[in-house]
Every structure is written in C-alpha cells, then in structure tokens.
Amino acid sequence: MRLFNYLILFTALLGIALFAMQNATPVTVTFAPGVSIESPLVMELLAASGIGAALAWLYSLWMRVQFTLEAREKNRQLQEKEVAITELKEMVVELEAKVKQLPPSKRAEPQEDIQEVKEVAAEGSPA
C-alpha cells in the first residue's frame, strides 16, 4: 500500500512539474485597486489550489470537532439513562420484596404501585 501511495504522489508531482513548464508565462493578478502581483501563472494557480486545500482541511477539522462534541453529549445522555434504569430496577426489586412480605390476601392491592413503577420505567426507557 505504501508503494501505491508513493506512486500516486510521484505521478501528481510529475504532472505539476509538466504543468509548471507549460505555464511559466508571467501574469498580473490584481487584488484591489493599486495592489497587484506579477508572477508566473503556475505559481498563482498553485497558490490558489493550496489556499483551497487549506480551507478544505479547516472545514474537515471543524466537522470533526462538532462530531466529537455531539458524541460526548450522546455518551453523557446514555450514561444518565443507564443510571436511571439501574435505579428503577432496584426500585422494582424492593417493591417485589415488599409484595412477597404481604399476607396473601393483601398481595393483590399494591398492584397500583407496581403499575406506576412499570409506567415510569416505560417512560424512561429509550425508544
């Protein structure tokens, strides 16, 4: 793979050298009234290409930073939800233990509490 990369780089540099030899005539670029530069066409084209590449790299860097920040936020939210799920599971275990301690005749009554816990667990679970 490294050889392939060097081959691509060599081909690109050879193409740039041939392009430079064909476009060596000086041209004038005016940036603003009274501000102009005269240099070979190839130098101006390479400078424009370099500036474009630098801007593309900065944009890529900015997108990577945004992605990292979003990923951190999603990880934080996930951890919060995992903590909530753990707390709800502990609550369910405690309520089930309380239900088992009740006499058989009263075990049917606290179903409202268990139903509330199940509703809270259903609301807190990710969709």
Image (spheres, helix red, strand yellow):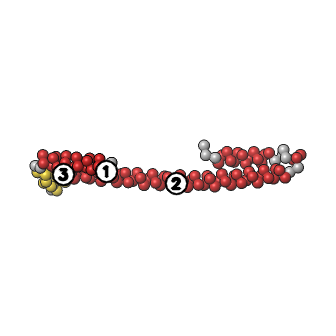
- Which residue occupies the foreground of this view, 2 or 32? 2
Disc 2 crowd, CA 10 A, few/some/many (<14, 14-19, 20+) = few
**Where is residue 117 drawn, in percent x and y?**
73, 48
**Where is residue 1 drawn, in percent x and y?**
33, 48
Closest to the camera, between mark 1 and mark 3, is 1
- Of callouts 2 and 3, which one flags the residue occurring earlier in the amino acid sequence? 3
Q: Is residue 15 left or right of residue 53?
A: left
Secondary structure at badge 2 equals: helix
**Where is residue 9 drawn, in percent x and y?**
25, 49
Disc assigned to residue 73: 2
For the residues labelled 1 and 3, the Cα–Cα distance comes to 31 Å
**Where is residue 6 drawn, in percent x and y?**
27, 50
Identity of the residue drawn at 79% across and 52% down: 97
Q: Is residue 46 left or right of residue 58?
A: left
Disc 3 crowd, CA 10 A, few/some/many (<14, 14-19, 20+) = some
The residue to which callout 3 is attached is 44
- Of callouts 1 and 3, which one flags the residue occurring earlier in the amino acid sequence? 1
The residue to which callout 1 is attached is 2
Closest to the camera, between mark 1 and mark 2, is 1
Disc 1 crowd, CA 10 A, few/some/many (<14, 14-19, 20+) = few
One can see residue 99 in this view: yes
